[in-house]
Image (spheres, grey):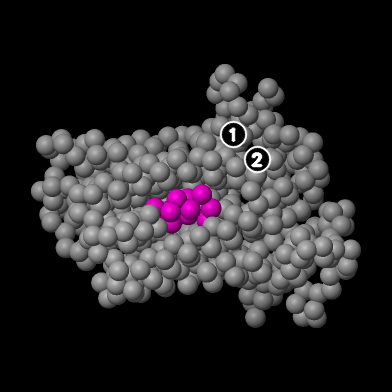
Amino acid sequence: MPSSVTAASPPLPAYPYFAPRYVIASIAVSLGGLLNGYDTGSVGAITHMPQFAESIGQLSATMLGITVSMIMLTGTLPSVFAGHLADKFGRLTIIIPGAVLFGIGALLQGLARNLAMFIAGRAVAGFGQGVFLSNISVYICEIAPLRYRGTLAGLPQFMATAGVCAGYFTCYGTVNIKSDMAWRIPYIIQCAFSATLAWACLLLPDSPRWLILQGRQADARRALQRLDSNMIEAERDFLSTTEQSPSLSPWQGFLLLFRRGYRARTILALFILGMVQLSGIDGVIYYAPVLFEQAGLSSDNASFLASGLSSILMLVVSIPAFLLADKWGRRTSAISGGLTLASCMFLMGSLYAAGVVHPYGVARWFVVIAVFVFGLTYCATWGIVGKIYASEIQPGHTRAAANCVAMGLCFGTNFLVAIMTPILLEASAFGAYFLFGGLALGTVAVLAVYMPETRGRSLESIQEAFHRPAALSSLTQLLRPFGHDARRRPMETPPGEEIEMGPRDPAEAVAASAVSVEALSRAMRLDVST
């Protein structure tokens, strides 16, 4: 296998050839997803351990909510700016300090002697998670071959699901330890995972696409060789381009995302990742025991179903979901998944509104099954396709920035749902279900109109899907099964609604890229100065 050494990146260590190095690199950086899921799966069990109460003190419902959700709150702000830093310094260069910060936060939690120190640790861990979490998806999306991009880009979400399962069973295994090590051991494990992620990023080459945007053609070719990438595919898709990333300030970079020609994709990414959380998935994960108890099951049964069986089933269903990510269309997965999620929420809301859910009778089992179907459907569809799609629809020089801003919104909505769900459940037995079901159904309607298909297309050719109004493109796709041959008819863009993503012709794009980027930089400077 070809390999070369650069001053900036040490060579990957020798290993038996089990898989191409781009697969191994994807698995290595996906440890960031494992960290995210491990904390989610363990923090609820940790805060309910009697050993934790003896060490830190008994938490009220309000303090429990603040403690658990602090990691999401502090992850919001750094997510917004992590993309600009990744565009400037490189994807891996930003993932490393994020992993280190998460490890420091885990260490503070594991050593905590009081609640203030524990919350401070969660705040630091959240800041680090906000720095690295969205950039790992961008890095994988940029190194993955076209044929396997969906599967590899879905790895962080699969690892997050595996982390939830691992976090729960770690606590299940340590709860019988009589000392405070029962709840401190999971944080020791988190420190080890964080150190492994940072070390792996030191060994990996930077994203070849990012290197091209920096004008470093030779380094990009060496990175491709070290990743065992297909050089013919790379030459066809991006190696021959002369486009370079414009030098913009953080504020200019943020404004660029919402300029004409970029804002359609930015808003779509924001919408998808925001609505993925507003579907109610975090309410189901964090408060599943409450949902089962509300349905009439005993507390013991509720805890078992919510924490153990659900985490195993979600992990199992995630395996075919990410392996087949490149077999299913992104639109098909998003729309069919959204319809199923909405149906589950409406079913539960209708049963509660009708007053037929009791500790006896068959209605309660419909609620239990609906909760499980909701969680499994989310893991198989929206959980996988949301992050993949948000990463791959962006152009190279705004991909990290746009994805990180969208991830910041994702953190914010996650926090909102975690705080809002118990309040809604207390105020109304069915209101929360109808709210989340309506949001999921509305999301499906928007995606059906504005979501172009990206499966089987290179990152560069995906941009061509935004040349035409998305509504007309989607209408074409909907009518094709009925014999409407819209492909033969020119699609005219209404005046004032053009989505200018660059020339249609690839050769034209290469010739115009250098000029357009230079003009863009000048325009941005003028906009900010005025």
Q: Please, is residue 378 above or below residue 263 in the view?
A: above
Q: Which residues are magenta?
A: 371-382
Q: Residue furthest front?
A: 361
Q: Quadrant of residue 529?
A: bottom right
Q: Quadrant of residue 349?
A: bottom left
| Residues at marks 2 and 1 touching, judged by CB atoms closer than 8 Å | yes
Q: Residue at x 85, y 63 (%)?
A: 485
In the visual, does 134 lie left or right of 6?
Answer: left
Q: Is residue 519 among the parts visible in the rendering?
A: no
- Name the dominant secondary structure of the magenta segment: helix
Find numbered disc 2 in the image and state the secondary structure of the residue it sits on.
Answer: helix
> Residue tagged by mark 2?
148
Of mark 2 and mark 1, the one earlier in the sequence is 1
Q: Residue furthest top?
A: 16
Q: Which of the image's four quarters has the C terminus?
A: bottom right
> Residue tagged by mark 1?
23
- Taking depth in this image into account, of 220 and 490 the one nearest to the observer is 490
In the visual, does 501 lie left or right of 95?
Answer: right
